[in-house]
Image (tube, rainbow, N blue to C red):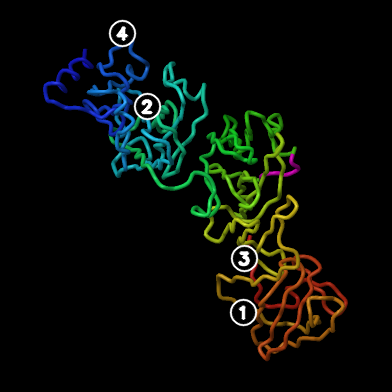
């Protein structure tokens, strides 16, 4: 009856609502946007599960139904504002009017809550080609979300007329609802490209535990990609379990060993120590080839981050190698020509690092061979010699040797190969190359000694 009363009231006021655009709510309830394709007002004897969960405002369309294709594209459409609905959170439905890339922006207004942290109010977004007939609470059992646990913003490619179910919750599924107006979701049509391109730095983030579709191998067909990470948790015995990779699929083919709880990535002979739980990425390492790579991230220990690359070809997923940092790091730059620049820690002399260049060659991503890197120092420190040090005139053991004498004055280190060689410049301009057999073991006059025996003021971190 409420639906018919709303419809009659709309007629009395002369209100004509657009078929797919801004949503309106009744009695504090968000109403799903629906695309009208019939001249007569919709009437159903049996309400859908969505209608049972929330009562939509009535919509009317006059004239030929083909006019719906000419509707103006909404520049910005707030499709949902959270509202308490008798103890349950319910989905809002958005149907795009045209093909394009849409920005999903989640905001959590400032408000007081006794039970929930505002940052815990998340969104799950399901993109379906057909209307979901079952109760909306079973969406997660039937489909993978296109966006999972959204906080902030992400872009998604949508087709006109798709059904986009937006579910707000404290746990992105069926958790206890928050207070009214606790969070909102805005959908904006953008001019951005979906997928890695020059305009977005050759990377496209994808929400973790969500499925995306993109042509990875250049065959003209979209591939279904899914990567999932289990959250950290404490079991009933008080044992803390770290985040663990759960699934890595392309076109529904599983590439992880899901039976191996310790290292599901062992088929690739790699191990993720502390996998990222927020994003995975589509990355176009080399725009001149047919491939777009899949990238996953690992925070390692002490935030020693890494990005690992995979290529999909002929139904197989191949590991290409890894670089330091994550794709969205300010110090990481993808050039789109097979090279990447990223900040890396050096395994030589002390705890420091610099911008390293990586090159994709013959299907392997590795640091450019023979590269000399300028160290970056983010703190003030002075290093001096304690003892005489025998060094080489060039970064070559066959070159001439010379001895640097301690004088209490600071040394500078312009270049290193990040593994064995470090260039040293004394205050008087004398220059030589020290050779490190291992990380902190330096060669001196035919012997290998701890570098702290030779240098004073080195910096070491955990």
Does 430 appear above or below 362?
Answer: below
Quadrant housing residue 3 = top left
Disc number at residue 67? none
Q: Are marks 3 and 2 in contact (CB under 8 Å)?
A: no
Residue receiving disc 3: 355
Which of the two discs, 1 and 2, sits closer to the camera?
Answer: 2
Q: Neighbour class for label 3 at 10 Å: few (<14), some, many (≥20)? A: some
Is 82 in front, or is 95? 95
Residue 287 place in picture, x, y as percent: 61, 52
Disc number at residue 382? 1
Task: Determine the main secondary structure of the stretch shown in magenta.
Answer: loop
Disc number at residue 91? 2
Distance from Cα at disc 1 to Cα at disc 2: 60 Å
Residue 84 visible, this orientation: no
Which of the two discs, 4 and 1, sits closer to the camera?
Answer: 4
Is residue 270 a member of the stretch shown in magenta? yes
């Amino acid at each position: 009856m409420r639906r018919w009363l709303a419809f009659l009231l709309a007629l009395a006021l002369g209100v004509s609502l657009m078929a797919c655009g801004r949503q309106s709510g009744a009695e504090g309830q968000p109403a799903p946007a629906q695309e009208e394709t019939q001249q007569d007002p919709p009437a159903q004897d049996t309400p859908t599960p969505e209608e049972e969960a929330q009562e939509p405002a009535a919509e009317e369309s006059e004239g030929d139904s083909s006019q719906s294709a000419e509707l103006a594209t909404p520049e910005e459409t707030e499709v949902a504002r959270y509202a308490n609905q008798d103890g349950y959170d319910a989905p809002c439905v958005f149907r795009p009017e045209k093909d394009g890339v849409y920005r999903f922006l989640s905001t959590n207004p400032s408000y007081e809550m006794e039970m929930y942290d505002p940052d815990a109010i998340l969104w799950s977004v399901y993109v379906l080609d057909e209307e979901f007939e079952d109760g909306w609470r079973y969406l997660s059992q039937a489909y993978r979300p296109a966006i999972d646990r959204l906080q902030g913003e992400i872009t998604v490619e949508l087709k006109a007329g798709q059904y986009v179910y937006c579910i707000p919750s404290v746990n992105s599924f069926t958790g206890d609802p928050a207070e009214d107006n606790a969070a909102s979701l805005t959908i904006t049509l953008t001019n951005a490209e979906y997928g890695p391109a020059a305009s977005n730095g050759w990377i496209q983030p994808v929400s973790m535990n969500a499925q995306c579709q993109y042509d990875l191998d250049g065959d003209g067909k979209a591939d279904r990609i899914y990567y999932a990470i289990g959250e950290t948790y404490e079991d009933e015995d008080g044992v803390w379990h770290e985040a663990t990779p759960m699934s890595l699929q392309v076109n529904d083919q599983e590439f992880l060993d899901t039976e191996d709880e310790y290292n599901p990535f062992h088929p690739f002979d790699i191990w993720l120590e502390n996998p990222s739980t927020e994003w995975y990425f589509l990355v176009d390492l080399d725009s001149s080839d047919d491939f777009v790579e899949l990238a996953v991230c690992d925070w390692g220990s002490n935030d020693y981050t890494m990005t690992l690359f995979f290529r999909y070809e002929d139904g197989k997923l191949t590991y290409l190698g890894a670089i330091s940092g994550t794709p969205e790091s300010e110090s990481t730059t993808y050039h789109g020509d097979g090279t990447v620049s990223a900040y890396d820690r050096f395994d030589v002399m002390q705890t420091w690092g610099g911008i390293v260049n990586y090159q994709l060659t013959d299907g392997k991503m590795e640091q450019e061979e023979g590269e000399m890197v300028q160290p970056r120092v983010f703190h003030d420190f002075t290093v001096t010699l304690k003892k005489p040090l025998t060094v080489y005139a060039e970064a070559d053991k066959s070159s001439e040797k010379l001895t640097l004498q301690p004088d209490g004055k600071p040394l500078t280190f312009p270049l290193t190969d990040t593994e064995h060689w470090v260039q040293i410049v004394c205050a008087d301009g004398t220059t030589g190359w020290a050779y490190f057999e291992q990380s902190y073991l330096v060669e001196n006059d035919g012997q290998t000694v701890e570098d702290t025996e030779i240098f004073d003021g080195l910096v070491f971190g955990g």
